[in-house]
Structures are given as structure tokens and as C-alpha cells.
Amino acid sequence: MLFDSHAHVNDKRYEDDQHEMIMRAFESGVELIMLPGASLESSLSGVELSKKYDFIYSAVGIHPHDTKNMDDMTLEMIKGLAKNSKVKAIGEIGLDYYYDFSPRDVQKKWFEEQLLLAKELNLPVIIHDRDAHQDVMDILTKVDAFETGVVMHCYSGSKELALEYVKKGAYISFAGPVTFKNARKAKEAAAVVPLDRLLIETDSPYLTPDPFRGKRNEPEYVKFVAMAIAGIRGISFDEVANITYDNAKRIFKIE
């Protein structure tokens, strides 16, 4: 049993074969998928898609790239979407200082506002953090987002920072980069995160793992992330699959 804890299966790259791609994943053992929102449009389409499949759940939120377009009405609309029974988290939200597509002060403002919304709704948050490690940690701590649950999606920080997050109760999710030969930091972090705080994901259609690197990613390929972590930890594939499946069901409160 596998749970792809982060897959954008409503992305335009799947418009020609979306159902086939989703069923390929299910038939290969991916029994649950979390579909995160990144904009108002993708949050809405994600909720609608999750209603069509029993095994797909959704998160709603505005990615840091899109916060430049955010206002109070956007936040209210996210709040309305979050009340759907298939919505299990607010995300993906956070900070991205690599691209800086939105001004940093704007990113911070709406990151904090969405964290407060998650607390109000008693939902966990799915965090995007690219080159903004200290500010992300500071804002999560200031709001005490850990009280309602934090998932560090596609973790890219140090093993020391991963353990800091774990101490606060966060879950650490690894994606395709943990399969890359040169991904030293991801492998080091994957080696030390306690098993009960570990998640796996594809971030489809991005970050395709070896051996399909360079091609479009799909939830079916989450098995390669599980295989890589099993190798790093010296445990079986089944153990990684079952533990991460149970962990994701727990953080997202899926019965």
C-alpha cells in the first residue's frame, strides 16, 4: 500500500490521459493520493477531481508564487473550499526565495494568514520551502502551526533542520530528488528522520525520480521514492510503504 502525499494530478500536463494516469497509479498499488492546491483555480479543480475518486483527497491553498495575486476575498474563497469533506489540509503554502515570483513581504503576509486559517479550521498545513528555511521556521513557530499539524513537502533542508522540525511534531516528506545520485542532503535527512514522521510523494508532474528522470512524473512512480528510502535505511520496501501510508493517513485524518 502506497500513499502519494503530494501529486498535482489536475495539472495541464495530464489533460490528455488524466483518468488513465490516475488508474495506472491505483493499479500499481498507490491506494491514496493527496492533491494540493497552488492557486485558487487549481484548488477548486483539485476539490472537484477529488470528489470523483474515492482514493484522492485534496488540499487547498495559494502557493507563494501566486500570493502576489492574493487578497482577503481569495482567503475567504479558500476557507469556503476547505469546508468540503474531501479537503484534508491547507496547502501548498509557504515561501519561495529561489524564484521570488511574489515579493517576499507579500509571501510572508499571506503565508501567515493561511496558517492562521488552518488553525481556525483545525487542518494541517503542507509547506513549500525553497531557500527560505529560517523565515519558514520562524513563521511556523510564531503562529504555532505545529499544533494542528505540519508537513514539510519535498524536503530540501539539512538533516539538523529536519530533526528540529520533527521535535516540534512535523512530518518530513521526500520526493524524487532522494533517488538522485548527487542528492546528498536529501539522503542524509532521509536517513535520520524517525520512521513515524516520514512521508513519501512524487510532486507530480515535477521532480521525476530515477529511472524516469527527465520525463513527466506520475503518482505511480512514488514506489521509486519508497525504494530509495528503503535502501538508505536498510529496511524493506514494504516497511517504508506501510509506515508512510499510515503516517499520511494520520496527519491528514483519513479513516
Image (cartoon, grey):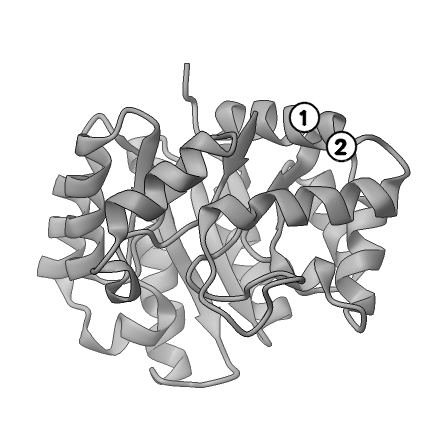
Q: Nearer the viewer, mark 1 or mark 2?
A: 1
Residue at the top extreme, as displayed: 255
As helix, strand or loop, the secondary structure at mark 1 comes to helix
Image height of 64 relative to 164, above or below: below
Q: Is residue 252 left or right of residue 151?
A: left
Q: Are marks 1 and 2 in contact (CB under 8 Å)?
A: yes
Across and down, in percent, residue 92 comes to: 39, 55
Across and down, in percent, residue 142 comes to: 52, 53
Q: Residue at x 47, y 66 (%)?
A: 206
Query: Between 25 and 38, which is closer to the camera in this rendering?
Result: 25
Kindly identify which residue carries mark 1.
243
Image height of 137 relative to 101, above or below: above
Q: Residues within 10 Å of mark 1 (few under 14, many from 20)?
A: many
Quarter where residue 80 is shown: top left
Name the kind of residue labelled 1 in the image: Ile
Query: Between 45 and 141, which is closer to the camera in this rendering?
Result: 45
Query: Between 38 and 119, which is closer to the camera in this rendering?
Result: 38
Across and down, in percent, residue 155 comes to: 63, 58
Q: Residues within 10 Å of mark 2 (few under 14, many from 20)?
A: some
- Sequence-earlier tag: 1 or 2: 2
Name the kind of residue labelled 2 in the image: Leu
As helix, strand or loop, the secondary structure at mark 2 comes to helix
Query: Tag on residue 164?
Result: none
Quadrant occupied by the C terminus: top left
Evaluate whether residue 67 shows in this view: yes
Q: Residue at x 55, y 31 (%)?
A: 2
| Distance Cα–Cα, label 1 vs label 2 | 7 Å
Q: Residue at x 30, y 40 (%)?
A: 58
Q: Is residue 57 left or right of residue 133?
A: left
Across and down, in percent, residue 95 comes to: 46, 70
Kindly identify which residue carries mark 2.
195
Evaluate whether residue 160 shows in this view: no
